[in-house]
Image: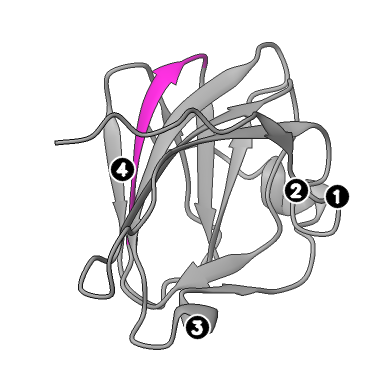
Amino acid sequence: MQIQPQKPTSLNPEEQFPGQVWVDPIVAPQTDDQRVTVAKVRFAPGARTAWHHHARGQFLHVTEGIARFGTRDGHVVDVHPGQTISIAPGEEHFHAASQGSFMEHIAILEAADDPSQTTTWLEQITDDDYNGTPTA
């Protein structure tokens, strides 16, 4: 058993996270047979990710504020504190904070066999993508 050293909060890169988005790493693989990564991610109002997808999917548990998640088919959902959203492997999506408040979620994902393929980043979302009509 070992207490892991705390890692510093970092500001995510603008190319992948337009607006201000901070990440606090919680769990990272310690051995070759471990794959899980967990992080607390905090978005300023209106901040968002670029389009992206994960080789093994992702779980996002909202802890604060209202999160917006969208997929390429135009489906946008608002997710509230205490709710968890599951994103399928390879599903192109974005995460964002609502315009009116900060949003925080816990991100959980498994590394791909080739860790460089775990997350594939694509182009920025448009305001129309972000403003899609929420369905939940």
Q: Nearer the viewer, residue 1 or 102?
A: 1
What range is drawn magenta here? 58-65
Label 1–label 2 contact, CB within 8 A: yes
Give the residue furthest to the front. Answer: 2
User: In the drawing, what numbered circle is on residue 14?
Assistant: 1
Disc 4 residue type (three-letter): Ile
Where disc 1 sits, the SS reads loop
- Residue 13 at x, y percent in the picture: 81, 51
Task: Name the mark nearer the viewer: 2 or 4.
Answer: 2
Disc 1 residue type (three-letter): Glu
Q: Nearer the viewer, residue 27 or 12?
A: 27
Mark 2 is surrounded, within 10 Å at the Cα level, by few (under 14), some (14 to 19) or many (20 or more) other residues, namely many
Which callout, 3 or 4, points at the residue further toward the start of the chain?
A: 4
Magenta stretch: includes residue 61? yes
Q: Which residue is mark 4?
A: 85
User: In the drawing, what numbered circle is on residue 117?
Assistant: 3
Q: Which residue is mark 2?
A: 17
Q: Nearer the viewer, residue 136 or 116?
A: 116
Label 1–label 3 contact, CB within 8 A: no
Q: Quadrant of the C terminus?
A: top left
**What's the CA distance linking mark 1 and mark 2?**
5 Å
Give the residue furthest to the left. Answer: 1
| Residue at 27% across, 18% down | 82
Where disc 2 sits, the SS reads loop
Task: Name the mark nearer the viewer: 3 or 2.
Answer: 3
Label 1–label 4 contact, CB within 8 A: no
- Residue 29 at x, y percent in the picture: 33, 59
The secondary structure making up most of the magenta span is: strand
Identify whether 85 is placed above or below 106: below
